[in-house]
Image (tube, rainbow, N blue to C red):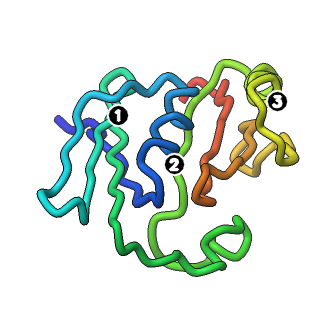
Amino acid sequence: MFTIHHVALSVTDMNNSIKFYELFGFKEAYRWSSDDNSLEIAHLKLKDTFLELFCFQNYQEAPQSSKELMSDLPRIGVKHFGLKVKSVHETKEFLIKNGYKDKIEIIRGKTEVDYFFIKDPDGILLEFIQDDRGL
């Protein structure tokens, strides 16, 4: 009866964010701008799910605590979104080959999955998860 339709993010630079998320297979499907250019919205599609990007000309920075996993998790609210991958090790190598410079640490989670996090151009946490549990 229900499926996930989209995840929404606010970003500081629409073109930069679109380029970043295209690296993972998202394709721009729709784009809208207000007449005064104060707001731009883009829908990026990956299979049946959309990533909805908002870019306000007068944006507000997120609190610093939201940019680090361990300080963000205790705060109530949306934390991050995850992309399922076949292999976290291959995904790590893919990111390195495509110029991602931050350290990537693969972790075996308490929920028995392997994962790692990176940050998008605005510091938003993005998880890559290898889930072989068959749930």
Q: Which residue is mark 2?
A: 81
Three-letter residue code for mark 3: Ile
Residue at the spot x=41%, y=48% of the render?
14
| Image spot of residue 57 (x, y percent) | 34, 67
Label 3 – label 2 distance at C-alpha: 20 Å
Which residue is at 63% across, 60% downward?
A: 123
Q: For the N terminus, which image quadrant?
A: top left
SS class, disc 3: helix
Q: Which residue is mark 1?
A: 44
Q: 93 or 130: which is nearer to us?
A: 93
Decide which of 57, 114 is in the foreground and name it.
57
Q: Is residue 4 left or right of residue 106?
A: left
* Horizontal relation, residue 73 to residue 61: left or right: right
Circle 1/circle 3 CB separation < 8 Å: no
Q: Is residue 73 above or below residue 35?
A: below
Q: Residue 134 vs residue 15: left or right?
A: right
Q: Residue 113, position in %: x, y?
A: 72, 37
Q: Is 48 in front, or is 9?
A: 9
Residue 40 x %, y %? 27, 53
Identify residue for label 3.
96
Q: Is residue 135 above or below residue 36?
A: above
Pick whichever, 116 or 120, lies toward us. 120
Nearest to N terminus: mark 1 or mark 2: 1
